[in-house]
Amino acid sequence: AKFVKLLEEEMDKEQRERVCSEEDDDEEKGGKRIMGPRKKFHWNEEIRELLLHVVKLKVGRYELEKSKSQALEDYLKAFLDTEIKLLWPKGWMQARTLFKESRQVHAHLTSLPAKKKVIAAPKLKVKDSSSKLEK
């Protein structure tokens, strides 16, 4: 059992060394790195609620600021990118995903008023019964 465990540890070491050396080789060559499958974070209600709470606090702070040098949308995107995105491992989260997930808290302030499409109802040809009555 000890032998198997030592063998597994040795294989892990070799694999880590290979991965590290492959990354170094890519950087030295200046070539493109081969990327694995895209990482997608699966949200749950607890994490979503925590994100909404933090964004709500940040929106409240923005509203209290006297000099609003940035638009709220830019302010939030910068905050999400520099402070919140870092909570996830590299490659697992994007600032635009955080912005979309937190939209229910800030949409009333950040979204532009959408132009409503007016769909004209097809006009029905109505026979003028009043002209018949006059005759």
Image (cartoon, helix red, strand yellow):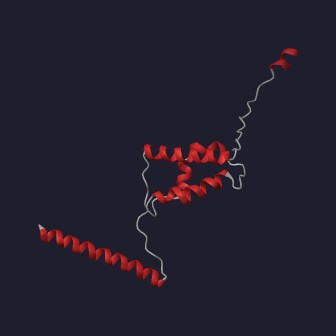
Residue at the right extreme, as displayed: 135
> Residue 116, percent across and down?
70, 41
Q: Is residue 7 above or below residue 25?
A: above
Quarter residue 118 falls in = top right
Judge from the rendering whether residue 78 lies leftward or rightward of residue 120; answer left or right.
left
Judge from the rendering whether residue 129 lies leftward or rightward of residue 73; answer left or right.
right
> Residue 99, percent across and down?
56, 52
Q: Is residue 32 above or below residue 65?
A: below
- Rendered-image quadrant of the N terminus: bottom left
> Residue 25, percent across and down?
41, 82
Res. 135 in view: no
Q: How many marks?
A: 0
Residue at 48% in and 77% down? 32
Residue at 53% in and 53% down? 98
Residue at the bottom extreme, as displayed: 29
> Residue 11, percent across and down?
23, 74
Q: Is residue 69 above or below residue 9?
A: above
- Rendered-image quadrant of the C terminus: top right
Residue at 69% in and 53% down? 71
Q: Nearer the viewer, residue 126 or 80?
A: 80
Residue at the left extreme, as displayed: 1
Q: Is residue 23 above or below residue 53?
A: below
Quarter residue 38 falls in = bottom left
Residue at 74% in and 33% down? 123
Q: Nearer the viewer, residue 6 or 108?
A: 6
Res. 17 in view: yes
Q: Nearer the viewer, residue 9 or 37?
A: 9
Q: Nearer the viewer, residue 70 or 22?
A: 70
